[in-house]
Amino acid sequence: MPFSTFSARAIALLTAASFAALPAAITPSASAAEPSFRVSPGTGNFGKVTYSNSPKKVFTVKNTSKVDLMFEITSVTPETQYSLALRTSGSEHCMVDAGSETHYWGVEPGGTCDFEIEFIPVDEDDYPPGKSVKGSLLVSAYSAAIGGDYVHGPSSGVLNTKTVKLSGKGVEPKVKVTPGTVNFGRVDSEGTAERTVTLTNKSDVPLAMLVDSQLFNAPFKFVYINSQDGDGECRTSDGYYWTVLPGESCTARVQVNEPGDSVETDFLSVELARGVGPYYQGPPSGDVIGYFEIQVKVTGQEN
């Protein structure tokens, strides 16, 4: 056998033996892996939400690793639309920090903690009515220092994170106006006439329907009397607004006074705020959350 052939085979065998003799420690161990956890549901879609409502969704964090972990909601965005509530419940392993860092909670292997995210839709430039509010929350995991019934501040930097996407739409409450146009027909130029209009709350929140008499457009205006008689049971007694529950209706009265001898068409605007409970339980609550218009028309004529 030629020397060169023998040398090549010998070198190959020696090289293979050298690799086989390397210690197994060079293979990454399971303990070096990032600690694992799961957030469910994986996304939070609040759907359409009427302004002044603030629904909550519960999310569950489960420690699926073999070590104690501490969790924190690092961020919730946008802050003007979504809000974090601390953990509400969980398994027996869910322990809230007993020290000054009460926004952390510790979870043993296999344990869970629940927390809530609240959607508080606000009508603002970046998020007008009907536009999807796309946000997110970031959950961070740390090494935990759990002893007995207590958990104390994180004992490491961030070990792992998960992002949960959030979405929802803020919408104005809906009011159905029947008839769509209040047509007074022909009215004497110096006369007065009244018509009724039915206002139905088609939203899921009690509504206070507010009208400022100073904003009425002549010759049209609403007619108020300081009693519940005549305007239906949906009206408050102070003569300035109606309280209408979801699915309920009320009958308002609109007046035209001295229309002159021309055709007049206009819109009477009514602002909406959240009503306080059932009928007659106090003034509106919070900011204006929408408005609607009542179209009015009259043909004035001289007799």
Image (cartoon, rainbow, N blue to C red):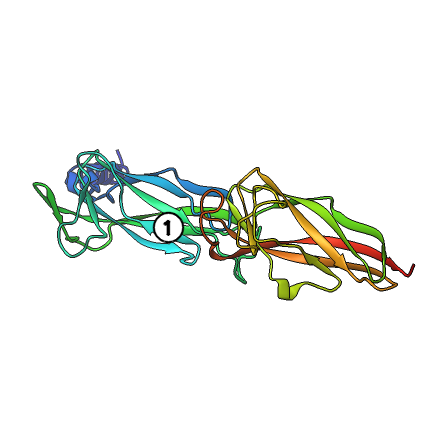
Q: Residues within 10 Å of mark 1 (few under 14, many from 20)?
A: many
- In the picture shown, does residue 136 fall above or below 257? above
Camera-nearest residue between 174 and 162: 174
Residue 151 in view in this figure: yes
Residue 147 location (% of width, % of height):
8, 43
Which of these two is toward me, 173 or 6?
173
Q: Residue furthest right?
A: 303
Who is closer to the viewer here, 207 or 187?
A: 187
How many numbered dots are placed on residues in this image? 1
Q: Which residue is pictured at 15% across the width and 57% down the height?
A: 100
Residue 85, compared with residue 109, is above or below; it is: below
Residue 59 rendering spot, x and y as whole percentages: 34, 40
- Asked if 15 appears above or below 225 in the picture, the reply is above
Q: In this orientation, which residue lies closer to the viewer: 62 or 78? A: 78
Q: Is residue 22 visible?
A: no
- Element type at mark 1: strand
* Residue placed under numbered mark 1 in the picture: 137
Q: Residue 171, how many percent across, how many down?
A: 55, 49
List the single residue furthest toward the bottom.
214
Image quarter (top left, top right, bottom left or bottom right) of the C terminus: bottom right
Query: What amino acid does circle 1 point to?
Result: Leu
In the drawing, does residue 253 fall left or right of residue 241? Answer: right
Where residue 279 appears, as percent x and y from the top left, is: 49, 43
**Residue placed furthest toward the left:** 148
Is 16 on the left-hand or right-hand side of 235? left
